[in-house]
Amino acid sequence: MTGTQLALRLLLELASLAALAVGGYGVWADGPVVLRTLIALALPVLAVVLWGRYAAPRRPVRDSALLWYGVQLLVWGGAVALLAAGGHSGWAFGLGVVMAVNTLVLWSLGEWSPAIER
């Protein structure tokens, strides 16, 4: 069960990047296409940098549990919020529910903690 939940976690992390791109593009519906495209590209890149530095299991910055929780909340919450704001509320709700359930299951299995190293 743990392996399946961790695999789902990886897929949800990738889905959050796609949601940031889609939501970032759609949130400014009247904006210039070039700027919307830049936003759609910049948000996932920023999320990858933050996640890799502060939330990944092999992250270089390990001294702050607050950063670990905060970056995960920022990336996943931002993905759901931008997806909803971009006009995809059904997808946002579904993604948010699956993210929350996966996090709760991993927490109950002892696999969601800033102390875990892989």
Image (cartoon, grey):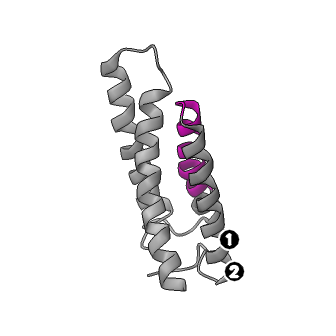
Q: What stretch is highlighted in magenta?
A: 70-87
Residue 104, labelled with which disc? 1
Residue 17, percent across and down? 42, 49
| Front in this rendered view, residue 26 or 68 | 26
The quadrant where residue 24 appears: top left
Q: Counting other residues with Cα less than 10 Å from the Cα at mark 1, is it few (<14), some (14-19), or many (20 or more)?
A: some
Q: Is residue 9 above or below residue 30?
A: below
Give amino acid for label 1.
Answer: Leu
Q: In this view, does 38 lie above or below 72?
A: above
Q: In which quarter of the image is the N terminus?
A: bottom right
Mark 1 and mark 2: Cα distance apart in space: 6 Å
Q: Is residue 48 visible to the viewer in this orientation of the structure?
A: yes
The reply to whether the C-beta atoms of the residues labelled 1 and 2 are less than 8 Å apart is yes
Does 118 lie within the magenta span? no
Residue at horizontal 46 percent and vertical 42 percent from the top: 20
Give amino acid for label 2.
Answer: Ser
- Residue occupied by mark 2: 108
- Left or right of residue 112, residue 40 in this image: left
Residue 54, percent across and down? 49, 60
Q: In which quarter of the image is the C terminus?
A: bottom left
Q: Counting other residues with Cα less than 10 Å from the Cα at mark 2, is it few (<14), some (14-19), or many (20 or more)?
A: few
Residue at horizontal 46 percent and vertical 57 percent from the top: 51
From the image, give the main secondary structure of the stretch colored magenta: helix
Does 78 lie within the magenta span? yes
Q: Is residue 53 visible to the viewer in this orientation of the structure?
A: no
